Image (cartoon, grey):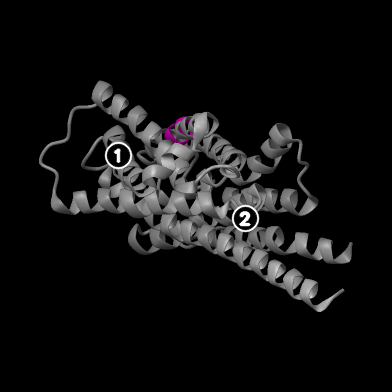
Amino acid sequence: MPLGKRILFWTTTDMKDRKNFLGHLALWGTAFIWGTSFVILKEALDSIGTMWVLALRFIIAAALLLLAAGKRLKTLGRDGLRGGVLLGVCLAAAYIFQTYGLKYTTPGKNAFLTATYCVLVPFMVWAFFKRRPNAANIIAAFMCVFGIGLVSLSGTSPFNVGDALTLVCGIFYALQIILTERFIGDCDALSLTGVEFGTAAVICLAGALIFESAPVGLSLELWGSIAYMGVMCTALCFFLQTWGMRYTPSSTAAVIMTFESVFAIIISVIFYDEPVTVRLICGFTLIIASVIISERAPLRLKKIS
């Protein structure tokens, strides 16, 4: 191979590796910030209605991203706009089930049961896109869910209605992840996510106005919590997720983002007095192992072949 072509080949390869690394890093950052949100959200729900929390959260996030997108919104086109609305419906449903579930269960259990989307994503990708998951994806997904079971379904805290609602939310999160992969390829990430949040904000605001009384006398601390959830946990995290999935397969992305539950349970242990048990440690170990398998096994298979 001539020297010029060889340099171009390695430059292109390095650029792809760099983008893949940054895509993975964006998803890990998303998982960490989301992990901090469960305790904050749990405390906010003690002072304000569920739908109002979600409505304010999505209004803040939508305003930020739509302003940042600016003229790029025009590049979405009809297909991108339709995709953003569909993503927003899935996102609103996921958050409504998750947040109502959090009212009746602990932050740690809520986080881990949400992570059941990990096992659903590879099979939904197979059903929707005819892309069969490899053995590593399947093994990692089931290890992840088994770890979730060890942590969440302990005898000291039996399965309840909050846990059931949280499991339903996992289905909608799985749909949101695979649909993001479907639409992000040809769309601007800021614009697509802004429309997604705008749709979710409209749905949650309508629910708040119909089913809940308007909040009054909110403390400065509560507004700070809502601002953190709107700016960091919603606007920033979903932009990072949407951008990161441009360079990461949805099956791998799903496993990485389940790590939010690990961060959440650590924070819940520290601030919410959840007990540290052998089951909890075993569950952690399986979750971490599932991430390693999902990340490394495909590379080894590729090298062998």
Q: Magenta segment: does it hold 163?
A: no
Q: Is residue 286 above or below residue 215?
A: below
Q: What residue type is disc 2 on?
A: Tyr
Q: Nearer the viewer, residue 161 or 252?
A: 252
Q: Secondary structure at mark 2?
A: loop
Q: Residues within 10 Å of mark 2 (few under 14, many from 20)?
A: many
Dominant SS in magenta:
helix
Task: Tell me the quarter of the image containing the N terminus.
Answer: bottom right
Q: Say how many tags the image has.
A: 2
Secondary structure under badge 1? helix
Q: Which residues are magenta?
A: 89-93
Instruction: Kindly identify the residue that appears in the image at 79 percent across and 51 percent down.
Output: 135
Q: Is residue 126 visible?
A: yes
- Check disc 2 and report the residue beneath it: 247
The numbered mark at residue 59 is: 1
Residue placed furthest toward the left? 217
Percent from the top left, x then y, of residue 301? 83, 61
Tell me which residue sits at (78%, 42%) in the image.
132
